Image (cartoon, coloured by chain):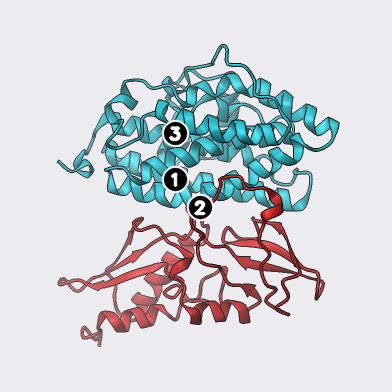
């Protein structure tokens, strides 16, 4: 018997069980991809989702998993709405989420910097702390990594490449 | 009247095609580098930028299809239009050439795109502004990447300097189209979209600053190409579309 008493909070908790396909240390709710869950008067469920990056290839998989998770709880009429505004930002990540990223081996994003020159001199490139040893003796190799949301760095202290979740 | 209620507004549809097509065509061009870039990091970077651009195009074209109201989605608009119906500027359809040329083209585009998207994200159309706000964040990463490379190539070896300067000279006549306005732009300017001409001073300021720091020389203004916005393209677009569209056209409605 399907429980119609499921509150929106419970549904949101349910969706916290879905890890991000590319950064499985975080779930899709704490990552900010799921904005809102609404139990409609007609019994259907509307889920507001927002893309992290415009071309994030994981979005389709995430949407399928949301629908599947809700179906498994008896919610067959799921409507996904893509919302664009306000645009997703890494500033929404909680301290707890950032700690999980670091434990997973990805340097968490800094706060999004205020306006800076469009093309700064390379010499002013910031050094981010290595998630393994904490050293700042690191070098940015590329602002584009294995997924849209990550940059590649190298730690000269522990001689390891590592990834950073880019501030966006 | 809210700008969002302008369903089946032909001018807005046309404008959204321009936004989508610029990014779709440039994204496809950049994707040609996948597996061919000079170093691994660059291969990954160009593919990432391509992915962002194609993603942005998807959102703009999806909205275009909704505004048109004839049941065409983003895939129909991308895969089932002929070259004459494409509305991108000629700059983005030109062949990649060498790495320097690809980078210089990207830089000229990225600076313009950041300024345009910044204007759009403040504009009156809520959904368009939301898509632009996201794209703007991505474009800031793109321009840091392409601008950084312009500095390195221009102020690099004799050969990298020569190639970057050649690219700048050859691409310059294609930049006029970025700022040319027609009746579509004029109808939307100031409310839904920024006036294209108003972006030029800021674009010129950033471009000339980076060009100077890269020890390159800003080309003199002269003849400027035009026509892309009206569907009059170079021969190169047709070849690009042939490759991009063949699967969708050969197997209509194919799913996997």
Disc 3 from disc 1: Cα separation: 14 Å
Q: Residues within 10 Å of mark 1 (few under 14, many from 20)?
A: many
**Badges 3 and 1: C-beta atoms under 8 Å apart?**
no
Residue B178: percent from left, percent from top: 48, 27
Q: Residues within 10 Å of mark 3 (few under 14, many from 20)?
A: some
B196 lies left or right of B165? left
Is the C-beta separation of discs 2 and 1 under 8 Å? Answer: yes
In the image, residue B150 above or below residue A93: above
Front residue (pair B67, A125)? A125
> Quadrant of residue A129 in the image?
bottom right
Residue B200 as seen in the image, left or right of residue B242: left
Subunit ID for the residue under disc 2: A
- Residue A122 pos. (x, y %): 70, 50
Q: Is residue B247 left or right of residue A93?
A: right
For the point 47% across and 52% down, the residue is A54
User: How far apart are labels 2 and 3 at the CA level?
Assistant: 21 Å
Q: In this rendering, which labeled residue sits more in front, label 2 or label 3?
A: 2
Q: Identify which residue, B240 or B102, lies in the foreground.
A: B102
Label 2 crowd bin: few (<14), some (14–19), many (20+), radius 10 Å: many
Front in this rendered view, residue A12 or B252: A12
The disc at residue B185 is none
- Do the residues at pointers 2 and 1 share their chain? no
What shade has chain B been given? Answer: cyan
Q: Residue A166 in the image: x percent, y percent?
A: 57, 62
**Residue at position x 51%, y 52% in the image:** A55
Q: Disc 1 on helix, strand or loop?
A: helix
Q: Drawn colour of chain A?
A: red
Q: Which residue is mark 3?
A: B80
């Amino acid at each position: 018997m399907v429980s119609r008493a499921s509150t929106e909070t419970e549904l949101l908790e349910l969706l916290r069980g879905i890890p991000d396909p590319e950064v499985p240390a975080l779930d899709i709710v704490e990552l900010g991809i799921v904005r809102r869950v609404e139990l409609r008067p007609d019994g259907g469920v509307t889920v507001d989702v927002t893309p992290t990056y415009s071309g994030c290839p994981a979005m389709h998989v995430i949407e399928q998993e949301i629908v599947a998770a809700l179906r498994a709880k008896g919610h067959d009429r799921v409507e996904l709405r893509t919302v664009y505004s306000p645009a997703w930002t890494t500033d929404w990540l909680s301290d707890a989420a950032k700690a999980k990223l670091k434990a997973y081996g990805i340097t968490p994003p800094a706060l999004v910097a205020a306006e800076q020159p469009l093309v700064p001199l390379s010499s002013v490139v910031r050094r981010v702390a290595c998630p393994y040893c904490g050293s700042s003796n690191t070098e940015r190799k590329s602002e584009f990594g294995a997924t849209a949301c990550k940059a590649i760095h190298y730690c000269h202290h522990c001689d390891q490449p590592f990834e950073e979740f880019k501030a966006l | 009247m809210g700008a969002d209620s302008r369903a089946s507004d032909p001018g807005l549809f046309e404008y959204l095609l321009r936004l989508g097509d610029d990014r779709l065509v440039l994204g496809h061009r950049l994707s040609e580098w996948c597996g061919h870039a000079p170093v691994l990091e660059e291969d990954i970077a160009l593919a990432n930028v391509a992915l962002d651009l194609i993603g942005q195009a998807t959102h703009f074209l999806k909205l275009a299809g909704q505004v048109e109201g004839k049941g065409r989605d983003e895939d129909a608009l991308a895969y089932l239009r002929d070259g004459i119906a494409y509305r991108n500027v000629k700059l983005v359809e030109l062949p990649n050439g060498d790495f320097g040329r690809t980078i210089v083209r990207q830089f000229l585009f990225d600076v313009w795109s950041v300024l345009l998207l910044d204007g759009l994200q403040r504009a009156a159309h809520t959904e368009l502004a939301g898509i632009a706000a996201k794209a703007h964040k991505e474009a800031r990463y793109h321009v840091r990447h392409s601008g950084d490379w312009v500095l390195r190539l221009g102020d690099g070896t004799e050969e990298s300097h020569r190639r970057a300067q050649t690219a700048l000279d050859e691409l310059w006549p294609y930049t006029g189209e970025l700022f040319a306005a027609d009746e579509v732009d004029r109808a939307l300017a100031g409310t839904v979209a920024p006036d294209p001409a108003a972006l030029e001073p800021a674009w010129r300021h950033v471009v000339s600053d980076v060009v100077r720091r890269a020890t390159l020389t800003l080309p003199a203004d002269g003849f400027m190409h035009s026509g892309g916005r009206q569907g009059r393209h170079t021969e190169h677009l047709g070849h690009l579309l042939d490759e991009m569209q063949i699967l969708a056209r050969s197997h209509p409605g194919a799913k996997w």
